[in-house]
Image (cartoon, rainbow, N blue to C red):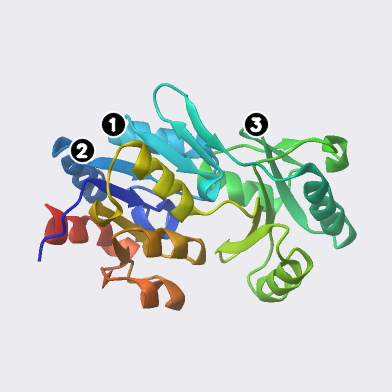
């Protein structure tokens, strides 16, 4: 079986990157071969653009990057911003105040910079995974009136399901609230989704969706895999992602991306 493909989209953590958040050489080489075959290779992640840029550069890509779960689409080389959908200021401050009341750590992503109240184990965890250092500013309410691209709570995995349900209920139809890692809850504009950004990008390059292939593993990849003409889930994917995929490859620690590329596309 060979899939017709003109655009290939890849989630990062849990998909293209291994469990150490490192890009295996096998995956890098497979993506380089896609590009050499004139297939548009697009990185898609909940990460900030600035943490995705080095990965894109390391592969040698010169394509747009979909960051912040689709909240921003920015070209890796020219820096041109194709699309940006931030969180409304009032809702951003409401989340900040909720987190202050519950003593929750929160990342405030504004203008592709990362702000936190204080440096702690959670800010260090995030930096170790993404390479983005946090700037401690004390009370985040100082940003009242600003429109961040994303807010991110980092907490222990055992407490996350309860927190996720509460925040989804409290901000229903106001914000897009999703879990992206075992410790992460992210808040974005309700118009944001990886699938929507992928559709807009494919349209920009006149690529029909039936020629788009997407790879993912976590809850925020559902729209990505459902929108693409062919969706590939990792062997380590959560159940809802495996259920909506057209194909399941090996895990991210078994170079599942490279294996699927060589078997299905190249």
Identify the residue at horizontal 45%, vertical 65% (top origin).
222
Coordinates of residue 260 in the picture (x, y in percent): 20, 61
Residue neighbourhood size for the residue with mark 3, other residues' Cα within 10 Å, grouped as few (<14), some (14–19), many (≥20): few
The answer to whether residue 133 is visible is: yes
Compare marks 1 and 2 and give the one earlier in the sequence.
2
In what quadrant of the picture does the N terminus appear? bottom left
Q: Residue furthest right?
A: 101
* Numbered mark located on residue 60 in the image: 1
Q: Disc 3 designates what residue?
A: 111
* Number of marks present in the image shown: 3
Coordinates of residue 205 in the picture (x, y in percent): 31, 37
* Mark 1 to mark 3 CA distance (whole Å): 25 Å
Residue neighbourhood size for the residue with mark 2, other residues' Cα within 10 Å, grouped as few (<14), some (14–19), many (≥20): many
Is disc 1 in contact with disc 2, using a CB cutoff of under 8 Å? yes
Note whether 197 is above or below 195 in the view shown.
Answer: above
Disc 1, SS: loop
Identify the residue at horizontal 34%, vertical 47% (top origin).
23
Q: Quadrant of residue 168?
A: bottom right
Identify the residue at horizontal 21%, vertical 55% (top origin).
258
Is disc 3 in contact with disc 2, using a CB cutoff of under 8 Å? no
* Mark 1 to mark 2 CA distance (whole Å): 9 Å
Coordinates of residue 193 in the picture (x, y in percent): 52, 54
């Amino acid at each position: 079986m060979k899939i017709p493909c003109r655009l290939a989209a890849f989630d990062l953590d849990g998909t293209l990157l291994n469990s150490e958040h490192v890009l295996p050489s096998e995956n890098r080489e497979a993506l380089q071969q896609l590009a050499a075959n004139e297939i548009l290779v697009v990185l898609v992640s909940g990460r900030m653009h600035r943490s995705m840029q080095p990965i894109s550069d390391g592969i040698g890509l010169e394509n747009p990057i979909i960051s912040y779960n689709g909240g921003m689409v920015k070209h890796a080389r020219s820096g041109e911003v194709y699309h940006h959908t931030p969180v409304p200021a009032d809702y951003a401050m409401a989340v900040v105040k909720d987190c202050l009341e519950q003593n929750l750590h929160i990342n405030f992503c504004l203008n592709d910079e990362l702000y936190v109240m204080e440096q702690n184990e959670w800010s260090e965890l995030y930096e170790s995974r993404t390479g983005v250092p946090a700037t401690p500013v004390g009370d985040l309410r100082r940003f009242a009136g600003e429109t961040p691209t994303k807010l991110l709570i980092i907490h222990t995995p055992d407490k996350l399901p309860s927190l996720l349900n509460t925040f989804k209920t409290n901000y229903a139809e106001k914000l897009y609230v999703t879990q992206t890692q075992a410790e992460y809850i992210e808040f974005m504009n309700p118009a944001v989704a990886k699938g929507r950004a992928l559709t807009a990008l494919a349209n920009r390059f006149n690529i029909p969706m039936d020629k788009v292939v997407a790879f993912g593993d976590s809850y925020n990849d559902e729209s990505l895999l459902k929108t693409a003409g062919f969706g590939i889930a990792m062997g380590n994917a959560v159940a809802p992602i495996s259920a909506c995929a057209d194909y399941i490859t090996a895990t991210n620690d078994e170079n599942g991306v490279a294996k699927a590329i060589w078997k299905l596309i190249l």
